[in-house]
Image (tube, helix red, strand yellow):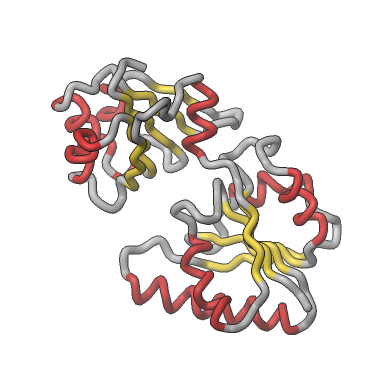
């Protein structure tokens, strides 16, 4: 019976991908590349391209980036039908996603629909952006009895104020959605020199920022992660 694989491909560096992920990429017949809009360059595909067989079929499926839950569900259901049709043909399918499939991933929206269709699924973990960022700048995410919180800024920038009080260390995902407001809150809470922002971690375009004014004045790249600590970084 054909199988569906959700494959985490890491934060951007093609070398930060697991051996199991590489073996699976070389095994599957079809690679599914999720995209927010049609004909957009796929970062995930660029990461894994060197590991694919020459005859691997690549299918791009659109998953809209929207807060409209009905639209997200409808499109995920539609895409699950496409996947089921290929599974029924005996094709093994790999769905590639940046970072880890179970952390703020499009893959999560797809899973319930695949399960309801009785598709055999295996999820292969990937290195998260925040783990890669912590390693890149040699700053622990948490130690001993410290707590760690994760905030997707795109959901609610105003949760940042409370989470800074509730956690010893904080990871902010999607900081590009309102980086200026984020900077204002960080400064007001006394974190002007207690954060690091890394964009495109592990790639040739990587940028590391400790300057809070840059968060206000310059556009933060979508592929960015920010770490805030109670102590100075």
- Spot the residue most to the left: 188
Check the picture and name the quadrant holding the C terminus.
Answer: top left
Residue 68 horizontal/vertical position (percent): 32, 69
Q: Write the residue at 65% across / 78% down.
A: 119
Q: Write the residue at 47% across / 40% down.
A: 223
Q: Write the residue at 55% across / 49% down.
A: 100
Check the picture and name the quadrant holding the N terminus.
Answer: bottom right
Which image quadrant for residue 160? top left
Which image quadrant for residue 92? bottom right
Q: Is residue 25 left or right of residue 107?
A: right
Q: Is residue 83 left or right of residue 145?
A: right
Residue 222 horizontal/vertical position (percent): 42, 42
Q: Nearer the viewer, residue 103 or 86?
A: 103
Which image quadrant for residue 86? bottom right
98 to 84, vertically: above or below: above
Q: Write the residue at 28% across / 23% down.
A: 230
Q: Is residue 218 visible?
A: no
Total numbered badges shown on the rendered structure: 0
């Amino acid at each position: 019976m054909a199988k569906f694989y959700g494959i985490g491909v890491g934060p951007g560096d093609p070398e930060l991908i697991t051996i199991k992920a590489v073996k699976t990429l070389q095994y599957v017949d079809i690679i599914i590349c999720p995209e927010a809009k049609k004909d957009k360059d796929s970062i995930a595909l660029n990461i894994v391209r060197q590991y694919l067989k020459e005859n691997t079929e690549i299918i791009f499926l659109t998953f809209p980036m929207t807060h409209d839950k009905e639209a997200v569900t409808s499109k995920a259901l539609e895409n699950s039908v496409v996947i089921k049709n290929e599974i029924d043909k005996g094709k093994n399918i790999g769905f590639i996603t940046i970072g880890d499939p179970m952390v703020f991933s499009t893959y999560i929206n797809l899973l319930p629909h695949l399960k309801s269709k009785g598709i055999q699924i295996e999820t292969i973990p990937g290195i998260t952006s925040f783990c890669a960022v912590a390693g890149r700048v040699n700053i622990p995410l948490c130690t001993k009895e410290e707590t760690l919180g994760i905030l997707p800024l795109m959901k609610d920038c105003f949760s940042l104020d409370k989470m800074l009080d509730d956690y010893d260390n904080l990871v902010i995902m999607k900081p590009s959605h309102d980086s200026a407001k984020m900077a204002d809150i960080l400064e007001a809470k006394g974190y002007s020199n207690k954060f690091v922002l890394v964009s495109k971690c592990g790639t040739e375009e990587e940028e590391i920022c400790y300057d809070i004014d840059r968060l206000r004045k310059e556009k933060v790249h979508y592929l960015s992660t920010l770490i805030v600590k109670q102590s100075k970084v």
